[in-house]
Image (cartoon, coloured by chain):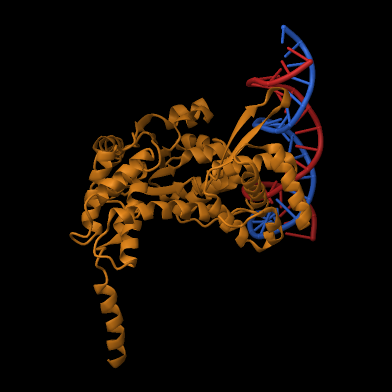
Chain colours: A orange, B blue, C red
Amino acid sequence: MKKNSTLDGIFESYLSNEKIFKNRNVLRPSYVPEKLPHRGDQIKRVGVILASTLKGGIPSNVLCYGKTGTGKTAVVKYVLKHLSEKSRELSIKEPIIGYINCGIVDTNYRVLAQLNKSIGIDVPFTGLPTDEIYRRFVEGLEKRGSLMIIVLDEIDMLVKKSGDSVLYDLTRINSTLENAKVSLIGISNDLKFKEYLDPRVLSSLGEEEIVFPPYTASELKDILSERAKEAFQDATLGPGVINLCAALAAREHGDARRALDLLRVAGELAERENAEKVTEEHVRKAKSQIESDIVTETLKKLPLQSKLVLYAIFVLTKQKGSNIITGEVYSTYIDMCQDLNIEPVTQRRVSDLINELDMLGVINSSVISKGRYGRSKKIKLTVPKKIVWDILEEDYRLKKLSKYVSNNKE
DNA sequence: TGTCCACTGGAACGTACGGCTT
DNA sequence: AAGCCGTACGTTCCAGTGGACA
């Protein structure tokens, strides 16, 4: 009992410390709220399509479009959740739901492996031919004998990286299945990704298409207010906090996820300061913290060669501003490799690495023609030099290169 | 008006690796 | 054990090109 009283004290003080938050998980992107403001139309459309499962039908395949944070995933998850509940209520066999985030699971093999996993079949993560994994999936599903709704989130990433052959298989799978059936829900951030699809896949996958427009600032405000009620203690949000979060996120193509992140981080900052209220100042701090966190995380994970290329770009940026071209990067890179005794990769490869850095949003590169003087990529660092330098400096393998950086301040 | 630079970016292929089947 | 398979990372080869300059 005595021991517990100390612990109790810790718990109590911890609990009473929750001056700001009531439940911060409400603000996390994975949370599916009870209400989804301004998505009534989309919910209705997905609902109508999926409702046919309640009468034993096979719903049409659906494609959802919209930029990040426009509620695509939330709407789909929301409808599926209610569909499962309804099925249970009516004691109809529940559909199996397979959710795959193709941003992470981005090869044909791994998608199929993941699908196997969601019907309870363990498959090795490598070693088997893809057909075999597919065959096992079909067999397993047939044994289960029910409808499976497969959600392919960020489907454009899969198609861009690995083509559409799994999609082709999945869209035709129903003709090989006897007892079981499959229906697909594709979610895409990219409106143009249809161009990469085989027309046969497209016509099957895109039986229904639902577009998710970006949220406007005032819609974001509603969403935030709704969630804030759940997430925060009463009267802890200062005036203008929600408006500011909404406005900042609206500027970024109406990204609700971003808006919620801002609100959550602002709250956490206020909490850390032991403040009574969350202020607009906290939101501004949250904004810059989120931005640098994202960049820091991606930069840390970069493989050595990419870091070297980034190093070269960084050094050139310090030396001569933003007008950098591939040739310069490559020769600086070669010098650096010599200093470090590292085998350099070819220029072709560096070109790809530059493209990858571009995709990550660390740099901005665009092909330009300098006429007589050839064609190249113009490269510009798009994140603060300070952040880049902090990461590069941290890597012990790159220690020797600090001589390239004249003055380390700033 | 055509030339020709300094690359770009597609395609095919090589190698190392972990891990399967038989 | 041998022989495949998929993935990651890279190479080699090369046709293609926007536009400043002669």
Q: Is residue C5 above or below residue A13?
A: above
Q: In this view, does A106 lie above or below A405?
A: above
The location of residue A102, given as percent across then percent down, is 49, 45
Residue at left 59%, top 44%?
Answer: A357
Percent from the top left, x then y, of residue A193? 49, 32
Viewer-proximal residue among A248 and A112:
A248
Q: In which quarter of the image is residue A398?
A: bottom right
- Relative side of A363 to A369, left or right: left
Q: In the image, what residue occupies the spot 55% across and 49% down?
A: A110
Asked which quadrant contains residue A393, the reply is bottom right
State the residue lying farthest toward the bottom. Answer: A2
Q: Is residue B1 above or below residue A197?
A: above
Q: In which quarter of the image is the N terminus of chain A?
A: bottom left
The residue shown at (33%, 51%) is A260
Query: Does the image show residue A55?
Result: no
Query: Horizontal placement of A256 versus A126: left or right?
Result: left
Relative placement, left or right, of A373 versus A189 is: right
Image x and y of residue A322, in percent: 59, 39
Whether residue A156 sits left or right of residue A309 in the image: it is: left
Q: Which residue lies furthest to the left in this view?
A: A234
Work out whether C1 lies above or below A77.
below
**Is residue A172 among the parts visible in the rendering?**
yes
> Which residue is more in the foreground, A136 or A125?
A125
Task: State the residue in front, A197 or A222.
Answer: A222
